[in-house]
Amino acid sequence: MLISALRRKVKQYPILLGGTAVWTIILAAYAILRHERLNSTVYDLGIKSQVIWNTWQGRWFASTIEVEHYLGDHVQFIFLLLAPLYGLWPNVNIMLVVQSLLLGLGAIPAYRIARRQLANHNLARAFALAYLLMPIIGFVNRFDFHPVTFVVFFLLMAIDMLEAERLVWASLFVFLALICREEIGFTVFALGLYVILRHKRYALGGIWAVGGLAYSIIAIFVIIPHFRGAGSDSVARYAWLGEDLGQIVRTLLTQPGFVWREHLSQPFRQQFLLKLLLPLGFLPLLSPLALAVAMPAIVYNLLSDVPSQSSIYFQYLSPAIPFLILAAVQGVDRLRRWRPQLPTAVFLSWLILSLGVAWFLDNPFTTPVRDPYYPVYGLKPISNRAAFDEAMALLPPQVAVATMMNYGPHLSLRPKYSLFYDRLKLEERPFGFPQTDYLLLNLSDWRWGVNARIFLNSIETAVGYFGYEAIYFQDDVVLLTQMAEPQPATGAMLQRIFELQEAGGKFAPTAQTTLDWLGQQWTMAEGLPETAVALPTQFADYIQLLGYELSEPEPVLGGALCATLYWQTETAVTTDYTVFMHFAAEDGFVQAQRDSAPAFGFSPTSRWQPNLVMGDLHCLQIPPHLQPGTYHLKVGLYNPATGARLPLLAHDGSPADDELQLTAVSLSN
């Protein structure tokens, strides 16, 4: 019976079903290809994929990116229904397919709603097509994976079932929409009022309205703070209006001028409203009641201080889309009642024209999404996929990994992974990065707000201070792990880092507060670490070298050699000196050198506090062409403005040499 019913539907709606299938395939293919070309991101495909996979593995809602328990970030119980999919196909692409499928299927209830209200197959097909071709549908599908987009299909189905008098099914789809994300209850509240006012179903509308409002309030103000420990990241986006919910409401009610001047007057927010209505020819404005159901989502996104929420390029407006379609359908119905002489061709032409202009302004397959929004990249490959795959093949499946924003989604089916550079957690970690088992990085991919200066110096710190070695390095893709045996690839990687720094990486603008915090990581109140070699040496200007520590006492040709120097000053220093480190042959010829400000410039000498010990890491690559033998590692200081070296002082205080030999280094075949 079911099969025969499906056959009848296929015969009845061949254009609708065929078009929906084709567009769904296009959406899914684009999403998968974008992901496979390393343009998807940890925020949010990587996060949600890991949480769903962990839930399938029995670690319910476990996350290692933003919060330890995902319910402290978002309440999305829909994950419980998605988790078994990883039992069928343990691949991130299955989530992209499901998202594209549900977005595509939304055309079917959109058609049914329009056909029922307009009694015109051509107009119904036009609205189904308009739904599929709304740029916002393409954009939300393009931006990774967000189960909140499922509400588009669920709410359209709820409207369809409501109008078909199938109230149990309608309530089921409302429930499915609710569990997609915590704020959906506000839209369901408005939908309940709509059911009361338009359909006169007081009991059903009351249940939906009260249930939706209660769900969102509990989710936002009870569940999220409980699992997060305090507050909510979502609520924090409205802090510009007040410190708590009461202040926010008072500001909105009593200071509309302030809200307009400080927020709503921004051009991109006004353009957002126009772009939202343009694809449907502004027809939703003719049906205020249906449009009102979309207003909660429009308002709370418009008032957020996150620019991406005031755009059609992201998932945030998903709850509003079904009611824009509904309002547009009712708008056409109202126009036809006012002007019954208007032919169907007028409405069809208007929808086609509106969609054409919308696509001219915003093509979801090609339009770049940049400032002031979160950057979203399309199909253009940025990273070397072949090198990434080779590095991935060397990575054990269950180990903890710190990685890049665009590598994370491909590493998300594991218990623990994190971002190597995460500006949101930069100051929560020693030296600013997580010291995990492995680091899988791309040296030159600085997208998504990566500060090149901090990023590159963090890798150097991982090598010189924490003992990471590169076991793979090709085309700027590097895989590092902590190991005792030195690797030639480590030196090659460091040399590339030096090149990138000199090419502009070290000049990346960095907030002074961040620089101060990074400098403090190299400050020690006590004396030398037990692992350091004491070598007390007095320089001029009251600067003393207390000792040093080598990262590798027996380096290899082409490998890395790093030395952490420990300085102390008796009084404040007014000059910012540069430290040089030379790797010299027996005859004094310098084979390799590195000149840089102390601690990568994060702790300049003019900021040293008297009597505190200052750590200072310097690395260089040992040239791979050197002959075996004994070499000498030498250090010193000079004034970069004049080039004059700071002399060492003899016991009587008189100037002695202008460089200090730290140690002899033996190289063998």
Image (tube, rainbow, N blue to C red):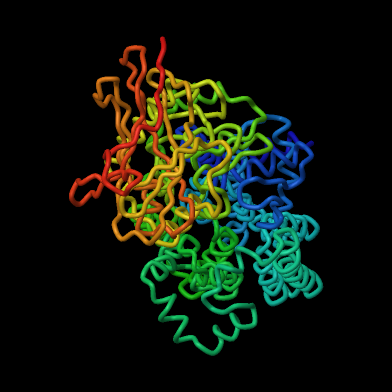
Between 561 and 575, the one lying in front of the other is 575
Q: Residue at x 54, y 48 (%)?
A: 527
Q: Residue at x 42, y 78 (%)?
A: 262
Which quadrant would the N terminus be assigned to in this image? top right
Furthest residue toward front: 652
Between 618 and 30, the one lying in front of the other is 618
Q: Residue at x 45, y 84 (%)?
A: 258
Furthest residue toward bottom: 254
Residue 658's place in the image compared with 474, above or below, is below
Residue 262's place in the image compared with 350, above or below, is below
Quadrant of residue 395 in the image?
Answer: top right
Which quadrant would the C terminus be assigned to in this image? top left
222 sits left or right of 657 in the view? right
Between 182 and 467, the one lying in front of the other is 467
Quadrant of residue 118 in the image?
Answer: bottom right
Q: Is residue 344 visible?
A: no
Residue 316's place in the image compared with 302, above or below, is above
Furthest residue toward top: 669
Can you give x and y, in whole percent of width and height, for residue 593 in the image?
Answer: 30, 32
Quadrant of residue 657 in the image?
Answer: top left
Can you give x and y, in whole percent of width and height, for residue 463 in the image?
Answer: 48, 33
Q: Residue at x 34, y 17 (%)?
A: 624
Q: Is residue 180 visible?
A: yes
Q: How many marks?
A: 0
Can you give x and y, in whole percent of width and height, for residue 562 in the image?
Answer: 43, 33
Residue 180's place in the image compared with 209, above or below, is above
Can you give x and y, in whole percent of width and height, for residue 15 in the image?
Answer: 53, 41
